[in-house]
Image (cartoon, helix red, strand yellow):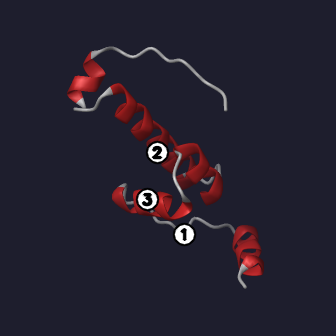
Amino acid sequence: MKTVTIQLPETVFSSLRKNPEEFVQEMRIAAAIKWYELGNISQNKSAEIAGLTRVEFINALSRYRVDFMQYTTEELAEEMENVH
């Protein structure tokens, strides 16, 4: 795992009513959801970036009002091949 350091104003945490750890986790989820929504990454990769299971990521999509069905034709075909 790679560690990345970013600097944020102290006021960010109080304005969002989150401690730094909660803020970072929420930022990971928000970024993963946006990249997924834009079609840049898959659901599996998004969940990995967010630090969630795939089911937890799908639930997060619902909280952010993003459709969980963002599949391309190729991705859908691949998913169907993996169904047993």
| Quarter-of-image position of residue 21 | top left
Residue at 22% in and 24% down: 14
Helix, strand or loop at mark 3? helix
Helix, strand or loop at mark 2? helix
Residue 81, above or below 22:
below
Residue at 21% in and 27% down: 15
Residue 7 placement (x, y as % from top left):
45, 14
- Disc 1 marks a residue whose amino acid type is Met
Q: Are marks 3 and 1 in contact (CB under 8 Å)?
A: no
Residues packed near mark 2 inside 10 Å, few (<14), some (14 to 19) or many (20 plus): many
Indicate which disc residue 29 carries: 2
Residue at 43% in and 38% down: 25
Residue 44, above or below 31:
below
Between the residue at mark 1 and the residue at mark 2, the CA separation in whole angstroms equals 17 Å
Q: Which sits earlier in the primary sequence, circle 3 or circle 1?
A: 3
Q: Nearer the viewer, residue 83 or 71?
A: 83
Residue 26 placement (x, y as % from top left):
40, 40
Residue located beneath label 1 in the image = 69
Residue located beneath label 3 in the image = 61
Residue at 37% in and 55% down: 64
Between the residue at mark 3 and the residue at mark 1, the CA separation in whole angstroms equals 10 Å
Residue 2, above or below 65:
above
Asked whether residue 42 is in view, the answer is no
Helix, strand or loop at mark 1? loop
